[in-house]
Amino acid sequence: MNTFLGATRGITPDDIDERAVAASKVLYIEGYLWDEPGAKAAIEKAMAAIKQAGGKVDAQALAGGIWEAMITTGVGLAVAIPILLLLHLLEGMADRRALAMRRCASLILESRSYRGEADTDEPVHHRAGVVYAV
């Protein structure tokens, strides 16, 4: 069994061992792979091998799986897209707030040097030996 969900995207009819498929009791088909032309042809070949061996093929169960995958994807997108928009809005607000805080901190540090609190005429945050996190 493949555990990597994308492992079967490149499957083709040449990859199907009809004898092994016909001898199987269960053929598990992932509905989300049905859109790949090669995978679709491989699935059809596997289903034909099971039918020829006298097994049953339930195409409605496959269709139900595809429908379920489409509903799940739609619901996931309906939740993810608004949350992504909210994330961008909040990130923008945080960036603007951080910029405003940096500007205020710079103004405060610069104003200290103009009020005579600094020893030299240099701006406070550039004076040697003084470290400010701005």
Image (cartoon, grey):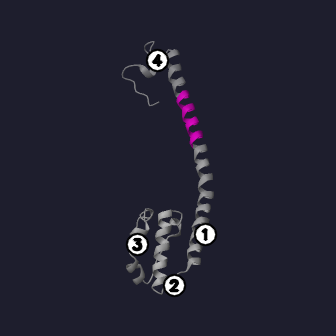
What mark, if any, has residue 123 been given in the picture? 4
Judge left or right: residue 115 versus residue 128: right
Whether residue 8 is visible = yes
What mark, if any, has residue 56 been given in the picture? 2
Q: For the residue labelled by badge 4, is the local secondary structure a helix, a strand or a loop? A: loop
From the viewer's perspective, is the residue at label 1 or at label 2 nearer? 2
For the residues labelled 2 and 4, say whether their Cβ atoms are less than 8 Å apart. no
Task: Indicate the quadrant containing the N terminus: top left, top right, bottom left or bottom right.
Answer: bottom left
Q: Note whether 40 is above or below 95 in the view shown.
A: below
Q: For the residue labelled by badge 3, is the local secondary structure a helix, a strand or a loop? A: loop
Whether residue 2 is visible = no
Instruction: Give the CA separation, mark 1 to mark 2.
Output: 21 Å
Answer few, some or many: residues within 10 Å of disc 1's Cα (few below 14, many 20 plus, some between 14 and 19): some
Residue furthest out toward the bottom: 54
Instruction: Give the CA separation, mark 3 to mark 2.
Output: 18 Å
What mark, if any, has residue 16 been given in the picture? 3
Q: Which percent across, then down, holds residue 14? A: 40, 68
